[in-house]
Amino acid sequence: GIQYKDVRFNPKSIRSQEMYGETDPMSGEWTTGIFAAIWAKYNSRNNAFNTWIIADGPVDAIWIEDLNTVLDDNKILTLANGDRIPMTDNVKIMFEVETLVNASPATVSRAGIIYVSDTDLDWEPVLKAWVLKRADPGYQALLETFIDRWIGKCTRVDPGPCFEFLQRNTAEVMREGRVGRISSFTQLFEGLTEGQETSFIVNNEKALERIFVYCLCWSVGALLEADDRSKFDRWLRDRDKSEVLPQVKQSETIYEFCVNSSTGEWEKWKPPKWTCPESDKLDFSNLLVPTMDSTRAKYIIQTIHRQKGPVLVVGAEGTAKTSTQVMFLAEQDPNEMLTKRINFSSATTPGMAQYAIEAELDKRGGKNYGPPNGKKMTIFFDDISMPEVNTWGDQTTLELVRLVIEHGGVYFLDKDKRGDFKTCEDLQYLAAMQHPVGGKNDIPNRLKRNFFIFNLVLPSITSINDIYGQMLVGRFTPNDFDDATLDVVGKLTESTIRLWRSMKSKMLPTPAKFHYVYNMRDLSRIFQGILFTPKESIIEGGLRAKEGKLDNFSPPNMMLGLWRHECDRVFCDKLTTARDKEGYDGLISEIGQDVFADAYDTACSSPKYMVSFLRDDIYDEDEILIDEAPKIYEDGGSLDMIRDRALMFLDKYNEENPSKKMELVLFEDALKHMLRINRLIEIPLPR
């Protein structure tokens, strides 16, 4: 037979001009496009092989219509510079698309259409083929038994009891095909059973079945939220006749457990102990505290990453998707594995994404490129669903990402190399995105199938308590603070979580108040404000206390007042009506009195205003500036004191800028708004 070659390109991962060619507007020079160069190269009767040119990307009515002269009886590619390149007998062209929604009747009538339904073969052939690749026939039979018991048989009308249950009784956070989930299952199962460390498990039927069920939960049932995980757990237990599943307490599920690789027994997830950094100023925005959720997510990421598989983590706001991936990347050995984080936004174009990837690669020989010094690199696409969806419903940036992940490279955009494929070696991929609900984008189904996908749920109240409890214990130690202050600190997590949950349940979003959304980030901001405050401001009261201008000052009162101030800034400042603010005031007073008793009324009888502009510049004897005023977050005293300080700055500005004088009246609301803005500017944000 005649040898053949296949040449793939994705028409939606490049601009139309890069596909066919363009004229430089300055020089008038013609630059050949990628498709035009491929077409010219392979449409030659001198080639001793047949070529299949495969357009592997979504169809729209623009680029496909430009191929009309190729698809009709002429079979000639006509370019804007006047070139006409005929199609030879040894070239075939094929379009591989997910849907023909945007294809015109002219296009459909010119090409032969073959439709493959996702239910024609479904997941069973994929899983059977994987089982048959196992070397030992006894091992194959054991796997078949597990599949029949836990997943079931697949027919054209029934995908099996496991998929049937999930489809009818649960709501998955995003849509993923059954074949993709079964592929994820096989990948995770291989990673946990076929390494040198776990080779003994293959001969341990009980341990093997435990791992089978564990992998089933984190692949087929990986896209469930907490309530649906409980349903799936109950369904698995109904089928568990031989007590394979772990014994759990009330409100626990199988998702809180893993199989120990040494013993083959179930073990509950436990996060490693976190140590608070010993520093007076905590960089709160970059603190990463391991939790049960992040620990089990890192374990799965590590298992798939070890097999060079891409991983996509989905989750709601504040579920630590990015933090978990960053913690995993921080554990990589920099001598072997480099890391690169690419943040996507609605403005990210395919060209920008390609440049961000190419910028880190060195030439290795020929058309092969890779990370420098022969190392490997993991690229983390954060907010991968953010790129804009165009008029045709495509995300062109994600088509480029799919090309890179599926085919291991991109096409050169250099003028003299158009049509050549740049192979990118030793790259691995991680990604994170929010749930595709409430107007947020989904990602293409053809990109999903390349990833191992799982959902990160919101941490449990116990986990939240652990996170912030550990931070507070590490920050406020008995060496620095008295027992009364530490008693207040010990109750802060409970009171804050109660207030946060009350706000979530009572201050609900409406079309007029669409921003009434309270997630983990709001909780973090409260503790960030508390931990941002220097110890001296709490122990000594700051400048105002030294001047004797603070009534009823004591460290416990200061701590409690600081907590109330941070809650006001995070929760109350979101509220838009006087009625809502009164409701909030009632909520926090009720919780404060319940948790802190009479101490709350004493500490919060008058509002506290935390500021960072009370200190003056430091000059020497010759009036030469030694140091600028330190910005210390401390109690500013009453509004009248703060107004005097603000007017002093205003007078100073007017003296220094007489032509730009500001005649401002700092009435009460204006002053309070200024303090809110100042706080937002001063507190560092995550990088």
Image: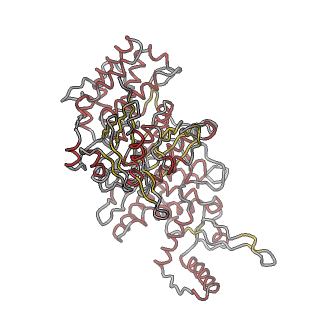
27, 350: nearer the viewer = 27
Image position, residue 428 (x, y; %): 50, 38
Residue 649 at least partly seen: yes
Going by the image, does 641 lie left or right of 122?
right
- Total labels: the figure holds 0
Vertical arrangement, residue 290 with respect to residue 389, above or below:
above
Going by the image, does 111 lie left or right of 28?
left
- Residue occupying image coordinates x 36% and y 25%: 2
Q: Quadrant of residue 110?
A: top left
Image position, residue 289 (x, y; %): 54, 45
Residue 453 at least partly seen: no
Image position, residue 558 (x, y; %): 57, 62
Q: Which quadrant: the N terminus?
A: top left
Q: Which quadrant: the C terminus?
A: bottom right
- Residue occupying image coordinates x 48% and y 78%: 670
Going by the image, does 644 lie left or right of 95?
right
Vertical arrangement, residue 188 with respect to residue 575, above or below:
above
Vertical arrangement, residue 80 with respect to residue 166, above or below:
below
- Residue occupying image coordinates x 57% and y 53%: 284
576, 164: nearer the viewer = 164
Vertical arrangement, residue 469 with respect to residue 556, above or below:
above
Image position, residue 664 (x, y; %): 52, 85
